[in-house]
Amino acid sequence: MFFDRLNEGGPFFMYPLFLILILLIILIVKGFLQKGAQEKTMSLISSIALFAIVWGFLGQIIGLIGAFDSIEAVGDVSPAVLAGGLKVAFLAPVFGMFIFLVGRLGIIIITWMQKD
């Protein structure tokens, strides 16, 4: 089910997002276990999470441009086909936003756990 959604959303954008999610989880765990230099880890988590959301939206924009080119070439498109295409167009940004939220949540928890 999960990998079907990755393929449906466009493997060129969704699989890198999946790898970014794994990397973020590793960095968050590293931030939990690390006692000293957490600032660098939190900065890296923040940057990678932001990259994930931008990568997702880039995938959406490129996909929509291709879809609109196809609609222009065909002319008449049924609402069901259009709705299916829009659903697929939103998969990469939603996954990117999810990854962004995981990263931000990790930063919040690491910051909360830091000793003053």
Image (spheres, rainbow, N blue to C red):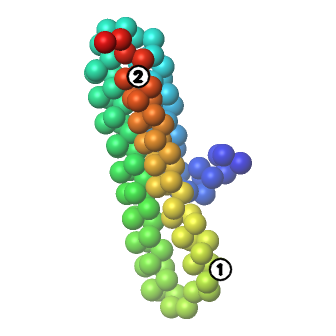
Mark found first going from the N terminus, 2 or 1:
1
Circle 2 residue: 112
Give the left or right position of residue 92, taking residue 5 as reference: left
Residue 65 spot, x, y in % from top left = 40, 72
Residue in front for this viewpoint, 2 or 99: 99
Asked whether residue 23 is in view, the answer is no
Give the left or right position of residue 82, taking residue 57 as reference: right
Q: Quadrant of residue 83?
A: bottom right
Q: Residue furthest right?
A: 1
Q: Quadrant of residue 86?
A: bottom right
Residue 76 spot, x, y in % from top left = 55, 91
Q: Quadrant of residue 63?
A: bottom left
Please give the name of the residue rendered at 58% of the width and 66% of the height, measured from the top-left corner: 87
Q: As shown in the figure, which amino acid type bears the numbered disc 2?
A: Trp
| Numbered tag placed on residue 111 in the rendering | none
Name the secondary structure under disc 2: helix
Count residues near mark 1 (Cα–Cα under 10 Å), then give few for <14, some for 14-19, many for 20+.
Answer: few
Please give the name of the residue rendered at 46% of the width and 41% of the height, measured from the top-left corner: 101
Residue 34 spot, x, y in % from top left = 40, 11
Please give the name of the residue rendered at 37% of the width and 15% of the height, measured from the top-left corner: 114
Instruction: Check the picture and name the quadrant holding the C terminus.
Output: top left
Circle 1 residue: 80
Q: How many marks?
A: 2
Q: Nearer the viewer, mark 2 or mark 1?
A: 2
Give the vertical position of 21 relative to 77 (above or below).
above
Q: As shown in the figure, which amino acid type bears the numbered disc 1?
A: Ala
